[in-house]
Amino acid sequence: MKITVIGTGYVGLVSGACLAEVGNNVMCLDVDAKKIAILNQGGIPIYEPGLEDMVKRNVAAGRLQFTTDIELAAQHGLIQFIAVGTPPDEDGSADLQYVVAAARNIGKYMTEYKLVVDKSTVPVGTADKVRAALQEELSNRGMDLEFSVASNPEFLKEGAAVDDFMRPDRIVVGTDDERATNLMRKLYAPFQRNHDRLVAMDVRSAELTKYAANAMLATRISFMNELANLAEKLGADIEHVRQGIGSDERIGYHFLYPGCGYGGSCFPKDVQALRRTAAEYGVPMRVIDAVETANEAQKHLLLSKIIARFGNDLSGMRFALWGLAFKPNTDDMREASSRVLMEGLWERGAYVQAFDPAAAHETQRIYGNHPQLTLVDTPEAALAGADVLTIVTEWKVFRSPDFAVIKANLKHPVIFDGRNLYEPAQMRELGFEYFAIGRK
Ligand SMILES: NC(=O)c1ccc[n+]([C@@H]2O[C@H](COP(=O)([O-])OP(=O)(O)OC[C@H]3O[C@@H](n4cnc5c(N)ncnc54)[C@H](O)[C@@H]3O)[C@@H](O)[C@H]2O)c1
Ligand SMILES: O=c1ccn([C@@H]2O[C@H](COP(=O)(O)OP(=O)(O)O[C@H]3O[C@H](CO)[C@@H](O)[C@H](O)[C@H]3O)[C@@H](O)[C@H]2O)c(=O)[nH]1
């Protein structure tokens, strides 16, 4: 099938590549000419494991192309995926300007039936706005063309995005007409050869399902974070508690890892947007309110632990920092806990020597040449001359380091670990003061 994907970010580029991989003819459109130029030169503008090979393979096979030409893109795909950003507006609601602009562009240039699919995470009711914007553009041109609008929220995780798209747990498809339903079933048939993973519903339910999934996962994390804080005070070990509850099939093991808060481009913004929608409709969402408040506090936890140990004046101290990205296997720094920590340390006069396998470039873009930040190329280089070590992202490379090297480099053998990478008892044996989250 001929498909257009509008927006070539994490979701658009992965979706475009994966849809091409199963044989579709995909055109990816972006308004960011730099991104398209990189892609057209065989590069990849983001770090995402497995994506580069897939993109190259499909470009070479003639199934995947990139453009900034809105008219070409609007005419190419029978199915038009909207995968542009929906960042939080000032009041926390999702900013729909890019989604609406994408819809208008389709309306301006389409010449035959189109199925427009919202893949961006959008509040309930957005499909109606997309429909209205598109219809208005058609009316301006005096055109009477048929089109459908569907919702197909995306559940991929950064760092595992290609695999998540190719082997989804479920494919949520919200449609309000049969033509759209049939097209979506046909499109997704190659992704569900073992069994039917397509969960069909109406558009509004599909839109809400996305927020429900993210809010539920964020709730589990905030719940575990608060429980970890309690365990620490009680002399219990959250790791045992995690295993003790995760073994209950009704609870399960996923997303029960406490840490220094959840970040990324999705949980924080989607929890906020859901709160906003609920407030608009006058429906109290007390649980979700608390999920966000708890997470804000958790992002400050490492800093609190540092202050409790070294005092509020950290001037002249040098902190080695392992991990910057909001999670491993990505270069994404959006809402990363490392930012809260670094900014808190800087405010108190400290220096940061940071290493991240992928996010250094993005960090530099955000902070420029900050006088209290040095970005280095290896975990060891971050340790050189540092007072203590802090860990914020659980990249594999940090899992079994040479502790002798760490000790030899640090002025104080102290580690603040926001992701519970090591065994506290072993760390004590090795002579470290080890501060983790909810561990004993
Ligand atoms: N990142 C994730 O892991 C993830 C997962 C599931 C869902 N989502 C949702 O998917 C959406 C996109 O997220 P993302 O992380 O891929 O965003 P992103 O910021 O990485 O990419 C968005 C892209 O859209 C482009 N764009 C903006 N307006 C455009 C227009 N009118 N025409 C063409 N291109 C345009 C931007 O230039 C940018 O390249 C968001 O709603 C997000 O909440 C993200
Ligand atoms: O047990 C856990 C699991 C995750 N996290 C943190 O939660 C955040 C989000 O992690 P993850 O969900 O793996 O990353 P995202 O790429 O943001 O993916 C989420 O957000 C996407 C965008 O909506 C959805 O598509 C995915 O299904 C959903 O998992 C990160 O900061 C993690 O460190 C924890 O603290 N504890």
Image (tube, helix red, strand yellow):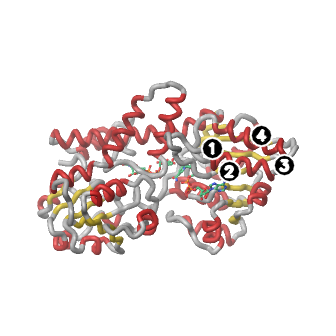
Name the residue carrying label 1.
152
Residue 146 is drawn in which quadrant?
top right
Q: Is residue 358 above or below residue 436?
A: below
Name the residue carrying label 4.
179
Q: Residues within 10 Å of mark 2 (few under 14, many from 20)?
A: many
Under mark 2, the amino acid is Phe
Residue 195 location, x and y as percent? 60, 44
Residue 411 - label = none
Residue 398 location, x and y as percent? 31, 65
34 or 120, nearer to the observer: 34
Residue 385 is drawn in which quadrant?
bottom left
Q: Earlier in the sequence, mark 4 or mark 1?
A: 1
Q: Earlier in the sequence, mark 1 or mark 2?
A: 2
Q: Cα distance, mark 2 to mark 3?
A: 16 Å
Label 1–label 2 contact, CB within 8 A: yes
Helix, strand or loop for disc 2: strand
Residue 306 location, x and y as percent? 21, 55
Helix, strand or loop for disc 4: helix
Q: Is residue 38 above or below residue 151?
A: below
Q: Is residue 342 above or below residue 89?
A: below
Q: Cα distance, mark 3 to mark 4?
A: 14 Å
Residue 313 location, x and y as percent? 19, 57
Q: Residues within 10 Å of mark 3 (few under 14, many from 20)?
A: few
Residue 81 - label = 2
Label 3–label 1 contact, CB within 8 A: no
Left or right of residue 69: residue 237: left
Q: Earlier in the sequence, mark 3 or mark 1?
A: 3
Under mark 3, the amino acid is Glu
Name the residue carrying label 3.
112
